[in-house]
Image (spheres, grey):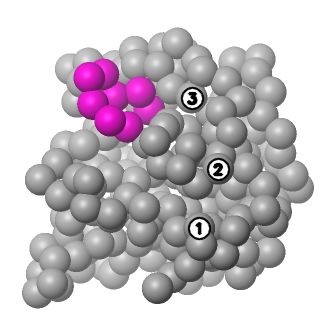
Amino acid sequence: MASADAPAVQRIWSARFGGDPSTQEKWIEAALNPAHSATGFVAVSTDAETVLGLSFLDVGDRSYTRHYLGLDTLETTVPLEERNGIFHLSCVRADWENRGIGSAFYERRLSILVDREVPRAVGIAWHRPHLVDSRVLFEKYDFRCHATVDQYYERLGRRQHCPNCGGQCDCSASLYGRSVSTASSSQIDQS
């Protein structure tokens, strides 16, 4: 992701996932800062002028990861290590879904975690009502579902402007995790 991608990234993020614009801006700033552990990715059209999708990865210690997942508030358990890769978000334009962009984002993030020697990856799968959602990709890449939480975002008070709910999100979500060391080469191949 480059600075020039930021407006398109924020538009796709808002349209596909919603959320607070200030949260979006903070993640974009972190991903653009080479000193920060966050990384941002974009998929672009062949002419490299149109952003088709975005994805974010961060690495956090156990405490940060517990907070990010909301484990204390939810009184739920997800196995964690001292360092964890956090699959923050992936969004693909609706007209570009089911063309392998999401899979490419998962493979790239797993590859980076292997390179950084991060032992565990975690993420949150938003249950998009009546649509295919990221649970399919988490399971394709051997993540294990550790908990499904009804009204996840509402319980944590973290997500305003849900595109499905028309305001504060009351959708369910599942918490996923996997060991990075068990990643097979086919699941992180960058070919």
Residue farthest to the right, as pictured = 82
Q: Give the residue displayed 53% in from the left and 50% down from the top.
A: 140
Q: Are marks 2 and 1 in contact (CB under 8 Å)?
A: yes
Where residue 53 sits: x, y (%)?
28, 62
Residue with the mark numbered 1: 187
Disc 1 from disc 3: Cα separation: 21 Å
Task: Give 111 or 153, whichever is nearer the viewer.
Answer: 111
Say few, some or many: other residues with alpha carbon within 10 Å of mark 3 (under 14 / 14 to 19 / 20 or more): some
Q: Give the residue displayed 51% in from the left and 82% down from the top.
A: 190
Q: Which mark is residue 142?
A: 2
Where residue 108 sits: x, y (%)?
52, 73
Disc 2, SS: loop
In this rendering, position of residue 50 left or right of residue 134: left
Residue with the mark numbered 3: 174
Q: Which segment is the magenta one?
A: 126-133
Q: Are marks 1 and 3 in contact (CB under 8 Å)?
A: no
Q: Quadrant of the N terminus?
A: bottom left
Say few, some or many: other residues with alpha carbon within 10 Å of mark 1 (under 14 / 14 to 19 / 20 or more): some
* Amino acid marked by disc 1: Gln
Position above or below: 71 against 58: above
| Residue 108 part of the magenta-drawn span | no
Q: Is residue 178 visible?
A: yes
Count of marks placed on residues: 3
* Amino acid marked by disc 3: Ser
Q: Which mark is residue 6?
A: none
* Amino acid marked by disc 2: Asp
Position above or below: 80 against 58: above
In this rendering, position of residue 50 left or right of residue 169: left
Where residue 102 sits: x, y (%)?
38, 58
Q: Give the residue displayed 56% in from the left and 79% down from the top.
A: 189
